[in-house]
Image: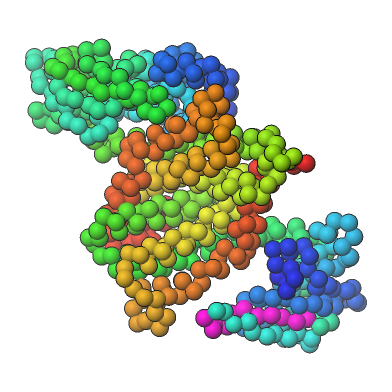
Amino acid sequence: MNDASEVRAMLIESATRLFADHVDARLLDAAKRDGWSPELWRIAEEAQLPLVSIAEESGGAGGSLSDLAAVLRIAGRYAAPIPLAETALAGWMLASCRLPIESGPLAFGPVHGETVTARQHGTQWSLSGSLRRVPWARIAQRLVVLVSGPTGALVACVDPKLCKVSPGRNLAFEPRDDVVLDDVVVAGSLVAPAAPGVDHAVLRLRGALARSLLMAGALERALELAVRYSTERIQFGRKIGQFQAIQQELARCAGEVAAAVAAALSAAGALERGEDPLLAVASAKIRTAQAAHEGALIAHQVHGAIGVTDEYALHHSTLRLWSWRDEFGNEAAWAAELGRALAAAGADQLWPLLTRD
Amino acid sequence: MSEPNSGSDLASVKTRAERVPKGWRVTGQKVWTSWAHRAHAFFVLCRTAPAAGDRHEGLSQLIVELDAPGVTIRPIRFLDGRHTFNEVFLDNVFVPDAGVVGAIGQGWKQVTSELALERSGPERYMTTFPLFTELMRRLGSAPDARALEMAGKLTARLWSLRRMSLAIAMTLDPGPDGADGAHNATVDLATEAALVKDMGTFYEREIIDAARLLFEVEPTPDAADTFERYLAETIVCSPVSTIRGGTTQVLRGLIARKLLGPLK
């Protein structure tokens, strides 16, 4: 163990305890109504979880991308109804462009590549454009937007109250809101040129990585629930886990979960070490999405009818899995993108690309 | 390891060794011994003490010289006619004490830990990789949408399997900066290795199916074209990987027992 991994082990332990202590059926049900849990946000913010991986001198909590990856996996496992991934990503945009990071939940956009235009009026900027399905926009303190200025891309920190926000949701009742900016005025101090590497492609890439990590955690929970249920439920006079048919399905599910965890965490590590980001993140998003498909359905099958009720916990995980696999590019979209890069590189580059680590 | 009546149920092996001065005398029959007709020696799992009570006790591993008196090797031809497998008959074959692997009586523990590590190795998910490379060559630089998606998915699965396999290897041998980069195994190593083999062996078949379905090619064993030849070779080998080194069903049982713990 080196220092970095010891610090990570402590972070994992404290984050796990925090979510285990506070995320329960009551909190998750309330979040379905309210779109999120302000109560959990307050506790997570006190523990400095939202800005992990952003340097302390930029107003973050310090730590590496792998530290953030560890936190997101745990957040996914507990179905934490707060915008941790989005706040970290928006915070990273702000820090990269040397803009101040304010406290409170952050959202970012665009997540579907739309164009928001910025025009300068003296010291101020005026922003106009429409954004589809922005995660958590209606509960965010600030919306960090990549916009198109007269001389290039800019990053702007916007008060969502100045925008027209139409609430929407994903399958798991998480806010996915349409946002219209109609000449929204932003002070010059909250707008900066986009730093190199802050662009539409990287937002999609980092968003996909975050969803992969959340899915890995959600899959772990789905498997835990299925295993526990198999040791409790009795049919034909035996615990259902004693039937080989159930055992084989659980083992298949465990494989999917292990692959998802390995892919998502490895992709974060690969990005941190400067390896090919497309190969790592596309692989992680494709593999976790496939695992989400198989894993969620196996977990439900093992549970039988009780698993499809809203009073049993499984749906908190599976509804998220079915949403997250399609956010920031589904497996077909990423596979096509990765396939194009591989075909362009040529057959003899396949092995070198896979092993350049 | 395997015998005619001991396949998945490996602990039931009947080959036995008796203590003699300066060594052991081995009698029995082994089967599926790859390359026994070329090798100098092979590893034999056998019983060195009777199976009283726990049948996992009393097993040992010996190295048997294949040119020793009492050894008979007969070929078992693979379904395409090739000769790699053999059956090996052992009739009172002498093995000196120096031929004992590890410790007498520890054979079960030794073979199961060997198998556990073998199961996560590249030969469990990469035997059809050469076909994948040739598939990419045949696709060229501008494949259609369906081919691009298949290539991307196959690569993503391979990348993920390789990361799992590497994580196991790095846990066994961390190297100078091993604590970074590798993810931690979600279960114990032997179970994680079983998961790699289970998924890896099915992954190998996905490559074969992609190759078959992307091109209209009939499997041609002696084709001059490398892609066509690899396709033919991998198809005839396709049932093997999910059988050798622990069948899919045995592995999944092992994984499930680890997940569920004692249920009685």
From the viewer's side, name the closer residue of A27 and A103: A27
Specify whether B183 is left or right of A102.
right
Residue B7 image-quadrant placement = bottom right
Q: Residue at horizontal 77%, vertical 62%?
A: B11
Q: Residue at horizontal 62%, vertical 52%?
A: B252
Residue B69 image-quadrant placement = bottom right
Q: Residue at horizontal 55%, vertical 20%?
A: A24
Give coordinates of residue B167: x percent, y percent.
54, 49
Give coordinates of residue A50: x percent, y percent.
42, 23
Q: Is B209 situated above or below A289?
A: below
Q: Quadrant of the N terminus of chain A?
A: top right
Specify whether A217 is left or right of A341.
right
Residue A170 in magenta? no
Q: Which residues are magenta?
A: B80-90
Q: Is A36 situated above or below B222?
A: above
Residue B88 in magenta? yes
Q: Residue at horizontal 22%, vertical 16%?
A: A164
Which secondary structure type mostly characterizes the magenta part of the structure?
Answer: strand
